[in-house]
Image (tube, grey):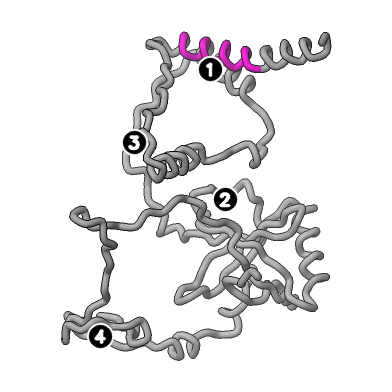
Amino acid sequence: MAVSSHKGAISFGLVHIPVALYTATQDNDIHFNQLCKQDNSRVRYKKVCAGCGKEVSSGDIIKGFEYDKDKYVIVTDEDFEKIKTEKDRSLQILHFADLKTIQPVYYDKTYHAVPETGGEKAFELLRTAMLQENKVAIAKTVMGNSETLLCIIPTENGILIEKMFYQDEIKEIPKSYARPELNEGELTMAKTLIESMAKPFEPSLYKDEYQERLRVLIEDKINGKEIIAAKQESGGNVIDLMEALQRSIEQSEEKPAKKKTTAKKQQGA
């Protein structure tokens, strides 16, 4: 059974909608253990007290803020809870906005919002109203030990909660680049290429092919098989931008043409 990451109430005006948040994504990557090069034994990290040198268990670790060199003020879980207000425990909607006005760089982590018992109708009312008005809600709540900025996004199936970065957490572009002038021919060909490659976004079509090859590699090594290097695709010696665009357009046009030929053969068979 799924365990919620956070519980609270979406609040706007005098309306309070109890919800539970569940993480919307998962890590499917292959993870490796660190081993000693000499005998392949696991490398382990221990938390050691700098004062007595003894290993410390998780239950004996507390939080402290260093306010001066080697001087700490201890802050307990009870302290964190004491300073929370009822407003902090809710997902307080600040205002509504157009989704297109929010740059993707501000998004951090996605959650599914699920209404708790008794909040279903108000939840559905908010979802439907925002969807019909093409609006999202900007909200705040306290998650862990910090006040978190949120974007509440209605979908056809429910509501997504996007954890967001604050403006001062966003880095500037580290390096500027020259913006050469473009001629009309280059721009037209680039648009043609984009149009020829345009298709609806279908999530099921995209797979992490590198992870799939990595799984095969691991299985082959377990079975003692020789690892064969993957074939490298050649892009050809294209130097001219216009030539590269033209070749790209031709390649994109070839793919559907091949599909049509195959279909004709099947019909004639």
Which class describes the residues within 10 Å of circle 3: few (<14), some (14-19), or many (20+)? few
Three-letter amino acid code at disc 1?
Answer: Leu
Give the answer, above or below, for where 126 lies relative to 262. below
Name the image quarter holding residue 220. Answer: top left
Q: Is residue 18 left or right of residue 226?
A: right
Disc nearest the viewer among 4 and 2: 4
Mark 3 → mark 1, Cα distance in angstroms: 22 Å
Q: Which residues are magenta?
A: 243-255
Q: Earlier in the sequence, mark 3 or mark 1?
A: 3
Residue 108 in the image, given as x and y percentages of width and height? 50, 57
Q: Which residue is label 3 attached to? A: 176
Residue occupying the point 27% across, 57% down: 35
Q: What numbered label is drawn on residue 72?
A: 4
Three-letter amino acid code at disc 3?
Answer: Ser
Residue 57 in the image, given as x and y percentages of width and height? 32, 83
Q: Secondary structure at mark 2?
A: loop
Q: Earlier in the sequence, mark 2 or mark 1?
A: 2
Q: Secondary structure at mark 3?
A: loop
Name the image quarter holding residue 73. Answer: bottom left
220 and 200: which is toward the camera: 220
Residue 209 in the image, given as x and y percentages of width and height? 50, 37
Mark 2 → mark 1, Cα distance in angstroms: 27 Å
Q: Secondary structure at mark 4?
A: strand
Q: What numbered label is drawn on residue 157?
A: none
Residue 131 in the image, given as x and y percentages of width and height? 76, 54
Three-letter amino acid code at disc 2?
Answer: Ile
Q: Which residue is label 2 attached to? A: 102
Give the answer, above or below, for where 34 lies relative to 104. below
